[in-house]
Structure formats: C-alpha cells, structure tokens
Amino acid sequence: MFGWTGTILRVDLTTGKVTREATDPKVARDYLGARGLGGYIVRSEVDPKTDPLAPENKLVFATGPLTGTFAPSAGRFDVVTKGALNGTLAASNSGGAFGPELKFAGYDALVVEGRADKPVYLWIKDDAVEIRDAGAVWGKDTADTTDLVRAETDEDAKVACIGPAGERLAPLANVMNEMHRAAGRTGVGAVMGAKNLKAVAVVGSGAVQVADPAGFKAAVLKARGMIQAHPVGGAGLKAYGTDVLVNILNQLGALPTRNWQDGYFPTADKIGGESLAAHQLVRPKGCFSCIISCGRVTKVDDPAYKGFGEGPEYETAWAFGADCGVDDLDAVTKANYLCNEYGLDTISTGSTIACAMELFERGVITAKDTDGVQLTFGNAAAMVEMTRKAGEGEGFGAKIAQGSYRLAESYGHPELSMTCKKQEMPAYDPRGIQGIGLNYATSNRGGCHVRGYTIAVEVLANGAEMDPRITEGKPSLDITFQDLTAALDSAGACLFSTFGISGVELAEMLSAATGVAYSLDDFMKVGARIWNQERLWNLDVGFTSADDTLPARLFEEPIKTGPSKGLVSHVGDMLPEYYGLRGWDENGVPTKAKLKELGLERRAGRARTAPREAAAA
C-alpha cells in the first residue's frame, strides 16, 4: 500500500497481548484513515450501548494517508472512541507530530482494548512495543508526564498523554500530545484514564511511501502555493492566530457573551488576536509540515497569572473571556495554560464556568456551593481559580469538570447549559450566523464548529460569500462543509489548509500519494459515507431527530445589543430541507437508498483480519 502503512497495531491492556493485522485496502479506500478509519473500527467492534468507561470500549489513535507526508499541514491524527461526555462517536482531531511519528513507526492506527489493572504507558519504537508501569507519572500534569516518559524512553519520542483530569475520568478531559496539542472535546481523555493508560510514547524510523513521487510533489507544491497566496492561510493566521476572530465576530454581533445571554462584548478588543500579538506573543508556531503557523507561543508576566506556554486560540479566548464576561487577557491565558497542564477541554471548561456564573448571579447557587468563590461574570480571578479547581477535582471544581449539562441539571436548570447533544457550543452565535447554528444542531458529536466550518463562507467570505443572517441555501452549505471536513480529517490534513485549497487539490494529493484515483466527487462521497456512519452510530446509541436542536435560549431570547440585536436562530426552518438533501427521512434516519449508495449497513460487521501476534520487547 502507498500512503497507508498497511498495518494496524492492537494492544489489549487486560491481557498484555500485542498483535498486528493488515489494514483492509477496501476500508482504507472507502474511509481513508484517521476519523473515518477509527470510526469504522469502533462502530464495527464496540456495542453502541457500551458504557464509555467500560473495558469493552476501545480507544483508537488513527492517522490518515497524508499524515507524515510533506503535504501542507499534514500532521493530523484522530483519537476515536465512544465519548465519555455524551456517548457520541468521538473523533478528536489533533496536530503536532505524534500522528506522523506513529506512521513512521509503521502504523495506520493503534487500537487500545481492555483495561490495565494498574497505571501503565505504551512505548512503541518501530516493531518493539512495551506496556510499562506508569506509577511514577500517575498524578503528574501533562508537561511533567511528557518529560519523564521521554527520559525513560527516548528524548525524540512523541508523547500523547492525559493529565490529572483524565485520571479522574472527568468528562471534559482531553488527550494532550507534545504538551500543548489537544485531541479535545467529547471526553476522550476520560476513556484513556478508564483504561489506566497514562501515555503513549512513540519513535519511528520509517517514512511514508507514496505511489507517484513526481505527481505528489507537483500536487503538493501547487497546494502550498495556493495556501501561501491566500490572505488568511498565507498571512492572517500566522500574524494573529485564530484569536483574530474575536473582533471580527464581535463586529458582526455574534460573539456569545455571558453564557450566551448576549452576542456583543463591548471590550472584546482586549482579548483579541491583535492584543495577544502586542502583549503576549513570543512567536508563531506550526505543526508537522505546517506552512500556516497559527499556533501561539506566549508569555504572561503579570505575577498573578505568570506563565509560559502555548495559546490561547480563539475558542479559548472566547470561552474564558467574553462568555465569562472577562476582558483580562492575562487571566484568560493563564486559564488556557492550566487546561493544557491538567488535560481539560478549554471550550467546555470555560463554557461550564460561564454557566456556573449565571447560576450564581440568579441565586441558584451561592458562595457556600462554590467554596467561597464569588463566581460572578467579569471576575477574572474567580474564573482562573475555578479552572484550577476543575483540574484538581477540588470542591465545586469537580462539578465544573463534569460539563455544563450535568452541572445545570443537578441544580434543576438544564436550560442554562449552552450545549447541543450535551456538548458545549463554540464561539459563534447561531442567532447572528444561521448556517453555523444548523451545523451545531446536526453535528454528530454535539456542539462543534470544526465538523462544518460554515464560518469560512458566512463570515470570512472564503471562496464564496453568503449573508450570515439568512437561512436560504444554508442546508446545502452545511452538508458540503460537513462532508468536506469529514474527508479532510480522515486524509490527515488540517482544516485551515482550506484557506487556500479545496477538495480538488486534496483529491489530487491523495491520488498521487495512494495510487487510488480520487476525483472531487469521490472525495466528497468518502466524506458523506463517514458522516452517515457517525449518524448511524448516534441512532444506535439512542439519539433521535429531537436531539438535532439548539438550546431554547437561542430560539426564544433575541440578542440584546450590538449589530445583531433582535435576532434569533431559525434552525427549525432549515432542518427538513437538510434531511431531504442528506437522503434521510423526515425523522433524520438515512434511507435504504442512501445507505446502498454509500455502501453502508445499519450495523457494521466486524472488520478484523486474523491477527499476527507481536513480540513484546
């Protein structure tokens, strides 16, 4: 095989058995890798009704055929499992260099099964695979874990690990790689913690072989040139990072503020990318084979929040900033550092603190509940302290680490949780941007912007321009972005590469890399297949069309101030057309004709081939 390594590594933590099996060429062609391949494995082998924290759940680290090549920003991989936050088919995408290193070691995917009887970590060096005792690093934060594991294995090792939040099985826990890159959302870190797996360290000495080296080089150089010529992909993201969006969204009146009670934050400029560049930025940083460098290496000198690390990105700056009514960028950045160290999802953590702030200001909870912390909107010190407490699982912080739905429901006010399918929505207000609202409502993993980034068109006019406030044409737009992103994620490419290239260029690079002829239609069909696979999983879990919705606040409470004052979401008006265009019935269930077209079954069969037992060093 070209592009793919042709091998899947399996580790059963219950028995200690290590096996390898061949990657099925047909499955590879149909699902590409990463999100698609990982989803196929989980759906084939895990009962949708399985408790996410049970040993029977599986945790898949999966790469794509472009991962580890010199395609632009091709350093992506996915952590796939039944998510601990809401039970959806979690596929948490991350960058850095861990995914390429797994490919260099010779693996398309690592499938972790069972549960160890004590804390362990995996050490993979090409064909040598060890299950090692992790007693010395259990309880450590992600930075210390990474340093200690590398000291015990190889200084060049790439390490993916959980922090204390994952060890405590917090539904907001991430898997962190290389200290600052996050496979976030949906609680994949809790699943890793439930397996008593602290870390995976990998070093590989191989390389990714492509089918047509000359054709691949030509396609890659073409794509790189297009990205570098794009004002966002080639310049904007490097200069200001994703946090540049704070002021753009605020000027539109679609920056969710104070737990989504409004869509406009008067002092947003204090937490935007321009302020970050002026006061905290040390240098931009990219992932493996990246030509965009949207990452931010930052430093905070304020003694109250002093620190050094990476971030914040836009979503983080919003969640701990505008959503909490906080305009202190040093405090926001400190909260980001804490989340990276503890292994917490920044979007969900910040949003849950914002939910708690509204509960506090309504008098539903008091300082007695919050360990004496005055959890009011705008209280930067309280926001940072509650982030620390969430990471430590200390007092009220343990409730924050459960997510806003569980928190609000426990106090009798689930309507104050700003979630879709019990996952916190990101930083774009559907009352002011109609298409992203439909994407949130139909997203297969709950509230998520990177499952269909309609913002590219609705706000940034990337490739096309559509009025964000209209509903016409948005169902078709959403489907296009959802399918494109599913295929792109599965290929191992970065979403931000689409600020310059399209599915055409991605298909060209895939074809030259794998030797499989992918047209644009083929590429988009792969995305549709993956999207429908995830939909089938959700239906089997028990989700229905009733879950394709937004919090009632966004339908009933118009934006109060700013340029989008008076607007509400109209997801309900768009949903029937979306279902129809998807080839689903009126209940949101894929029709037999659609499943036949995509080669899908209502329940996938087991895909495993006969395993080859590996010699564990």
Image: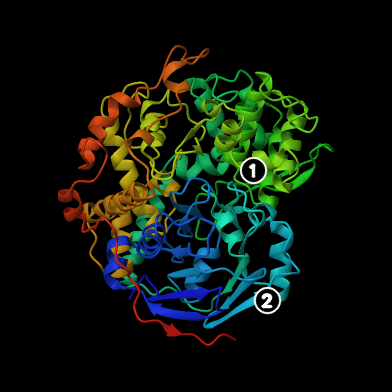
Which one is in front, 431 or 516? Answer: 431
Image coords of residue 435 (percent x, y):
36, 30
Instruction: Tell me which corner region of the image, top left, top right, bottom left or bottom right, holds residue 409.
Output: top right
Q: Residue at x 63, y 55 (%)?
A: 166
Which residue does the numbered mark 1 point to in the structure image? 401
Image coords of residue 71 (percent x, y):
41, 60
Which residue does the numbered mark 2 point to in the structure image? 153
Whether residue 542 appears in this view of the structure is yes
Q: Which amino acid, by three-letter code, is at mark 2?
A: Thr
Instruction: Tell me which corner region of the image, top left, top right, bottom left or bottom right, holds residue 240.
Output: top right
Q: Is residue 49 left or right of residue 191?
A: left
Q: Is residue 185 left or right of residue 606?
A: right
Image coords of residue 209 (percent x, y):
39, 75
- Rendered-image quadrant of the C terminus: bottom right
Image coords of residue 243 (percent x, y):
57, 36
- Residue projecting furthest to the right: 303
Q: Residue at x 55, y 44 (%)?
A: 238
Q: Earlier in the sequence, mark 2 or mark 1?
A: 2
Whether residue 273 appears in this view of the structure is no
How much space separates mark 2 and mark 1, taking CA atoms?
32 Å
Crowdedness of circle 2 by 10 Å Cα count: few (<14), some, many (20+)? some
